[in-house]
């Protein structure tokens, strides 16, 4: 179900807004759970036998799964409903944001003061500005003034509808789950400077401050309006984090200036040619002995062909052009190519803290679970688990 956000940067929904949003969340639940089950059955019972008859084997990779599935009526129904539900996510929240634009702008002007740095001459990469990422009208930057808070408000409200309650009331389930993982798994690691790269509105940045109250926590992103909105959102919740407009390809921080650099759901939205640069920059700004940690979609190399394609669906049908190319990479290779030693790489799967509770998260940490579960890892549906990977920078000798 759509969650009603509790913080003070939100517009007040009318009964009609709420009904529309609940309907869209419910439709997405139906598509991503029930129709997804029908799709799997159609694949096993119809598509694979047909493919086997023609090729003498089952589809071997995601591209073959896609080619075999695309004419199947169940796939067409699933995809058509999912695309339309995605567009309806944004349609269901934009009227209330537009209605309260002036009030939200005034609140953000005050509440974000001293907590956000943006630049009028900043050049937003075309990978963000030239497409409506996941059908979000105007992408992360919007069509108004560069620091207009509309895209931030639309993203926040849209994510509440999109995530169907699975990301929690403050949309911070990923950050809470990851911060819990790090703090329990590495109790002696006490970061004092933490950077969240590609933070959008900072919803998954805040849990780092909550887990490490003594740390200075900074979020960066290329989209100014989202940062300003996020700075106000954080400040109105009493969480002391700051935000800066910056391109992750050229971080404006000194070498060795962070203990922990985090990202979530960020790398799959980078053009592949820039991913290596971003990893190198993260390594540069980490202090010796520091930790780079990414929450991401699990890689295709660690999943079955059907499940791999199931996640890559977004690349073909949801304006996520870089998704598959990123997921075709091996995370350990990306870390190694950036200069991290191969034996400092690690990966893990952590159950969503909101869905399973802290005890289950702690149990998963203790049991060293790191295999990708094809049915649940990275799938925004009942049973969601998050995939994480990272690497420690070597200590100074
Ligand atoms: C899917 S959102 C990340 C969401 C957020 N981190 C979360 O936890 O849900 C991707 C974000 O990356 C930002 N972004 C894309 N390219 C970037 C770059 N080169 N440097 C910094 N931010 C970038 C986009 O503006 C967008 O806000």
Image (cartoon, rainbow, N blue to C red):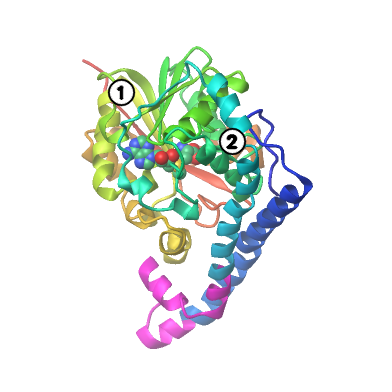
Q: Nearer the viewer, mark 2 or mark 1?
A: 1
The label number, if any, that marks residue 286 in the structure image? 1
Residue that badge 2 annotates: 361
Q: Which residues are magenta?
A: 49-78
Residue 220 shown left or right of residue 334 in the figure? right
Q: Secondary structure at mark 1?
A: strand
Q: Quadrant of ligand 1?
A: top left
Pointer 2 local density, CA inside 10 Å: few below 14, some 14–19, many at least 20: many
Image coords of residue 374 (percent x, y): 50, 56
Q: Is residue 164 visible?
A: yes
In this picture, is 347 found above or below 396?
A: below
The residue lying at 53 percent from left, 82 percent from top is 46
User: Which of these two is toward me, 376 or 365?
Assistant: 376
Residue furthest out toward the bottom: 53
Asked if disc 2 is less than 8 Å from ligand 1, the answer is no
Residue 68, magenta (yes or no): yes
Please state which of residues 5 and 186 is positioned toward the viewer in this rendering.
5
């Amino acid at each position: 179900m759509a969650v009603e956000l509790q913080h003070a940067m939100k517009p007040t929904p009318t009964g009609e807004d709420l009904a529309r949003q609940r309907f869209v969340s419910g439709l997405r639940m139906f598509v991503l759970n029930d129709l997804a089950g029908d799709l799997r059955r159609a694949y096993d019972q119809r598509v694979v036998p047909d493919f086997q008859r023609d090729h003498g084997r089952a589809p071997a990779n995601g591209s073959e799964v896609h080619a075999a599935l695309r004419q199947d009526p169940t796939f067409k129904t699933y995809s058509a409903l999912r695309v339309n539900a995605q567009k309806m996510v944004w349609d269901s929240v934009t009227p209330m944001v537009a209605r309260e634009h002036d009030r939200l702008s005034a609140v953000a002007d005050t509440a974000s003061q001293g907590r956000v740095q943006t630049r009028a001459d900043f050049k937003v990469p075309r990978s963000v500005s030239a497409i409506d990422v996941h059908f979000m009208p105007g992408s992360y930057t919007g069509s108004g003034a560069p620091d207009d808070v509309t895209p931030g408000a639309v993203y926040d409200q849209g994510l509440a509808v999109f995530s169907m309650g699975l990301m929690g009331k403050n949309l911070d389930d990923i950050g809470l789950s990851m911060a819990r993982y790090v703090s329990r798994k590495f109790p002696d690691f006490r970061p004092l400077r933490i950077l969240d790269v590609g933070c959008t509105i900072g919803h998954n940045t805040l849990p780092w401050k909550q887990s490490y109250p003594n740390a200075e926590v900074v979020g960066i992103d290329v989209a100014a309006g989202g940062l300003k909105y996020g700075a106000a959102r954080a400040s109105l919740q009493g969480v002391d984090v700051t935000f800066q407009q910056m391109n992750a390809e050229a971080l404006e921080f000194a070498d060795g200036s962070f203990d922990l650099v985090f990202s979530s759901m960020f790398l799959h939205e980078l053009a592949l040619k820039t991913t290596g640069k971003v990893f190198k920059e993260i390594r540069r700004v980490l202090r010796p002995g520091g930790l780079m940690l990414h929450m991401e979609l699990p890689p295709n190399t660690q999943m079955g062909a059907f499940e791999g394609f199931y996640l890559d669906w977004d690349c073909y049908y949801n304006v996520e052009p870089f998704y598959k190319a990123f997921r075709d990479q091996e995370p350990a290779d990306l870390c190694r190519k950036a200069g991290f030693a191969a034996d400092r790489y690690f990966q893990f799967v952590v159950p969503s803290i909101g869905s399973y509770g802290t005890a289950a998260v702690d149990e998963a940490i203790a049991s060293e679970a790191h295999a990708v579960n094809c049915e649940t890892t990275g799938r925004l549906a009942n049973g969601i688990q998050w995939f994480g990977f990272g690497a420690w920078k070597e200590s100074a000798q």
